[in-house]
Amino acid sequence: MKRNEGNLPDGIVYLNYKTPDSATLPKAAELPTLISEETFNVLREGDQNQEPLLVTEAIDFPVEGSGGVYTKEFFQSFLNRLKVHVFGGNKLGHSWPERDDFFTIGGKINTNPDGKTGTVFLKIYIPSFGFETTNSGFIRNVKAKNVHYSLVTYPQGELRKGDDGEYKMHFVESIGYERNDAVPFEGGAMKQRVNSSEVQKINFELARELIKNGKVSRDDNGEEFLVNGKVSRPMLRRLVANADCERKSEIGELISMIDKRKNGGKPVELKEAIEMVSNAAANGTVNLKDLMKNCGAEKLLRNEKDDEMIALANSLVAKLGDKPIEKLDLVLAENKKNAEAIAENAVIEIVGKKKLENGEENPAFTHAMKEVKGKTGEELQNAIEALKNDSVMKVLLGNVADPNSRINAVVTDKKLASNEVKAY
C-alpha cells in the first residue's frame, strides 16, 4: 500500500492484531488516559455524543509480528509515546493521505507473575464524526466486534537467543510514526498478511536476469515489482519484512543478489556487509547461528556463562594484579599454612604438648591431628569438641599424664628401647 509517497524510512512496520477471544477486557473508561487533558478536549470538540465512545482493545505479549517478536518493553514504549503525541487511526485501514477518524488515547499493561508475558490494553476514542464523513457505520461495526486493528510503528530491537537456541529479533522500543488504524475483521492477527497476488507479480527468472544486468531500482516507493524496467528493491524489502510472506527465501535471495552487485559489482565494504547481515537477520531470511558456524566464528558467540567468567576474571585481575593465578596460588598456600597452624594450636590446647619428654611424638597429638586435618572454622571447633569426649583420646591423654607410663620412659639403650616398644 502506498504511504507518504515512499518518503518514510525503511523499518516502518504494520503490526496487525485482534483482541484475544478469551480476554476479559477492562472497561475503557477505567483505563488511564495518557494524552493531555487539553489534547483530549480538542479531539472532542463538536462531538455529538454526550459521553465519549471509548473502546478497549487488547494484545497478548510477547507476540510474533512483522520482522520479529514484540516484547513487553516494546508495548510499554509504545504506550509511553502517547505522552508525546496522540495516535491517529483511519477507519479504512492504512492509506495515504492519512485521515484520522478515531484516536488511541491511553492504555495500560498487565504483566503476569513471570514478568515477561501479559496483556497490553489500548484505550480508543471514536468521535461521532470522522475526518470527512460520519462515523456511524464504523461505530456500528465496532460495537458488533467486527473490526480489528493494526499498529504502525518504527521499532528498534535486539537479537536474543530463544529457548530453541535460535536467534530472533526482539523489538523493545517504538521510536516514531505510531498509528493505530482499523482493518477488516480477521485482517489482523498479529502476523502481517501479505496479499499473495503481490508475490505472484514477481517473475523470479526475469528478476534474476535483470539483477545480473544491473537493472535495479533502489529509490522507488516499493509498490511495484518493476519500475521502468528495473527490479524494485524497496518492494522486495517490504514483502520480505512481513511474517506471512510467501516464498520468503526466494525473495531474500533476490535482495542478496542486488546487494552483491551494489557499486557496479565492486566488493562490498565491511560496513555494508554488516548492515546486509543485520537486515537479513531481522527479516528472518538468515539463521544467525548457522551464519556464525559457516564463518568459523561459532566459538566467538558469547552467552551468559561467558559473561560471568569474564566478569570473574576481571575481578581477579583488579584484586590480584596482572598475574592473578600466581597470586591466587600464593594466597591459597598461605591460607593453607595458616589453617594448619590454627588447627595445630587448637590440638595442643587439649593434649598439652606436642612432644613427650623422651623426644617422641605425643600419640594423643598424632591422633588428634588426624581427626582435624583439613578442617577450619566451625568445622574445626566441632572436631575439637568431639575429641574431648573421644574414648581413644581419653586413653592416650591418660597415658601421657601418667609418669609411670612406658610412653614417658626415657630410654638410652637402643636395644632396650626396642624391647620396651615391643612389650608395650
Image (cartoon, grey):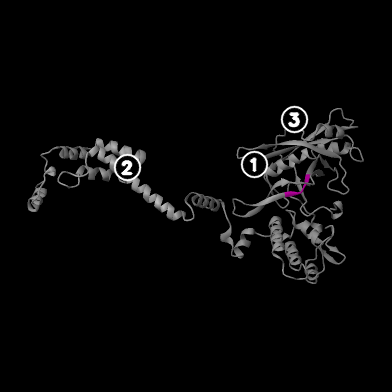
Question: Could you classify mark 3 by the number of other residues whose Cα lies within 10 Å: few (under 14), some (14-19), or many (20 or more)?
Answer: few
What secondary structure is the magenta-colored segment mainly? strand
Q: Earlier in the sequence, mark 3 or mark 2?
A: 3
**Vertical comparison of 381 with 301: above or below:** above
**Residue at (75% x, 32% y) in the render:** 32
Q: Quadrant of residue 207?
A: bottom right
**Real-space Cα distance between discs 3 and 2?**
69 Å
Percent coordinates x, y for residue 369 in the rendering: 26, 44
Q: Give the distance between the C-alpha atoms of the residues marked 3 and 1, in whole angstroms.
A: 22 Å
**Side of 115 relative to 347 (left or right):** right
Q: Please state which of residues 277 and 64 is positioned toward the viewer in this rendering.
A: 277
Q: Amino acid at mark 2?
A: Ile
- The dot on residue 372 is none
Residue under numbered circle 2: 342
What segment is highlighted magenta in the picture? 150-155
Q: x, y percentage for residue 2?
A: 85, 53
Residue reaching furthest to the top: 50
The residue pinned by badge 3 equals 30
Q: Is residue 374 visible?
A: no
**Label 3 vs label 2, nearer the camera:** 2
Secondary structure beneath dot 3 equals helix
Residue 347, quarter of the rendered image:
top left
Most foreground residue, 380 or 11: 380
Q: Label 2 vs label 1: CA separation?
A: 55 Å
Dot 1: within a 10 Å radius of its alpha carbon, few (fewer than 14), some, or many (20 or more) residues?
some
Q: Where residue 187 appears, x then y in whole percent?
A: 79, 47
For numbered disc 2, what is the local secondary structure?
helix
**First in sequence: mark 2 vs mark 1:** 1
Residue 239, above or below 135:
below
Badge 1 is on which residue? 117
Q: Is residue 208 magenta?
A: no
**Do tag 2 and tag 1 residues touch (Cβ < 8 Å)?**
no
